[in-house]
Image (spheres, rainbow, N blue to C red):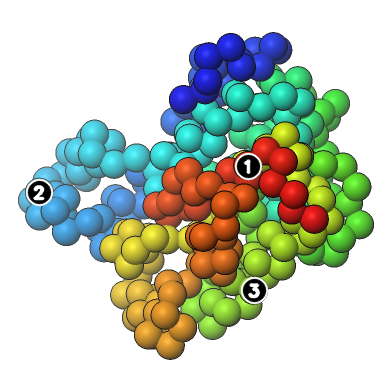
């Protein structure tokens, strides 16, 4: 939780968390469980047999949260200890948690800034429109660019980073991992992370096969097992990041389930 006396002066913890909770409640995170019970863990599948769709939904809403809920909530809680919040996202909202909308609203509430970058012109245009619809144009902007190229020329420092570019698909597991590492390394080497401390959340980095199995079909899971045997690691956008910072005292692993949340320690000297 946020250390006492370090609450951001422009808002309260409850305000930021209210924005977060309202956002996640609007994601309809449970709809897919009605369409395909293979996404549900075996324990719940057994209980769901014989229930109507409405009864299944009620049960899942009681038992399940969105896969990204715990790590996003921890991120928002930790953000409350930061000053001058500056958020950077690679991979703008296209589906899933609609993170660009969440970050734009948090930036406005916290008196900070938000930049989201995406290589797809349609996605970047959609993010621009979304920011305008939310009335966040004064604090947020969307950029169309390949993320690593953008980071190599970006000048402003940030203290909240969300890495969510380059889809994690079976035929490109290695490329996705390498891309995530390139983003992370560029952030560190160019001194883009606030020296007073920063938070980095990486999407699609499952800690275990069991966690991954709640999100993918059997064919995808089989490819993930092959990758694990071949490379001695599960596929993930942050898989190489995890390996390379695990013993580095400049970083602290705050949470790791389906997403990976890292704190960069103050005065880590990352250049």
Query: Secondary structure beneath disc 3?
Result: helix
Q: Secondary structure at mark 1?
A: loop
Residue situated furthest bottom in the rendering: 230
Task: Give the percent coordinates (x, y) of residue 173.
Answer: 54, 77
According to the image, label 2 marks what residue? 47
Q: Residue at x 23, y 39 (%)?
A: 63
Nearer to me, 66 or 262: 262
Write down the quadrant of residue 264 in the picture.
Answer: top right
Mark pair 2, 1: CA separation: 44 Å
Q: Would you say residue 111 is visible in this rendering?
A: yes
Q: Quadrant of residue 129?
A: top right
Count of labels in the image: 3
Relative to 176, is 63 on the left or the right? left
Q: Tags 3 and 2 in contact by the CB under 8 Å rule? A: no
Which label lies toward us, 3 or 1?
Answer: 1
Viewport quadrant of the C terminus: bottom right
Q: Earlier in the sequence, mark 3 or mark 2?
A: 2
Left or right: 28 in relation to 186: left
**3 or 1: tag closer to the N-terminus:** 3
Q: Residue at x 75, y 45 (%)?
A: 193
Q: Residue at x 42, y 80 (%)?
A: 232
| Residue at the spot of label 3 | 178
Rounded to the nearest whole Å, what is the CA distance between mark 3 and mark 1?
A: 24 Å
Dot 2: element = helix
Residue 79 horizontal/vertical position (percent) = 60, 30
> In front here: 185 or 174?
185
User: Which residue position holds label 1?
Assistant: 265
Q: Is residue 228 left or right of residue 142?
A: left
Pick the residue in front: 19 or 181.
181
**Residue 197 picture location, percent across and down:** 68, 37
């Amino acid at each position: 939780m946020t250390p006492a006396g370090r609450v951001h002066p422009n808002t309260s913890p409850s305000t930021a968390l209210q924005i977060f909770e309202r956002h996640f409640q609007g994601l309809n995170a449970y709809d897919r469980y009605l369409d395909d019970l293979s996404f549900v863990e075996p324990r719940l599948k057994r209980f769901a047999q014989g229930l109507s769709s409405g009864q299944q939904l009620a049960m899942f809403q009681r038992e399940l949260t969105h896969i990204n809920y715990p790590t996003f909530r921890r991120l928002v809680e930790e953000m409350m200890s930061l000053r001058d919040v500056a958020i950077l996202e690679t991979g703008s909202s296209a589906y899933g948690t609609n993170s660009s909308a969440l970050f734009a609203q948090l930036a406005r509430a916290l008196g900070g800034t938000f930049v989201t970058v995406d290589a797809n012109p349609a996605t970047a245009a959609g993010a621009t429109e979304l920011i305008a619809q939310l009335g966040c144009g004064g604090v947020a902007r969307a950029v169309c660019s390949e993320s690593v190229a953008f980071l190599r020329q970006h000048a402003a420092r940030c203290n909240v980073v969300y890495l969510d570019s380059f889809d994690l698909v079976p035929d490109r597991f290695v490329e996705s991992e390498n891309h995530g590492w390139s983003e992370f390394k560029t952030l560190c080497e160019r001194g883009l992370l606030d020296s007073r401390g920063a938070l980095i959340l990486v999407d699609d980095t499952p800690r275990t096969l069991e966690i991954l199995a709640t999100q993918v079909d059997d064919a995808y899971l089989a490819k993930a097992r092959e990758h694990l045997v071949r490379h001695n690691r599960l596929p993930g956008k942050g898989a190489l990041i995890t390996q390379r910072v695990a013993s580095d005292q400049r970083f602290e692993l705050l949470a790791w389930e389906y997403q990976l949340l890292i704190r960069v320690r103050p005065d880590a000297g990352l250049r």
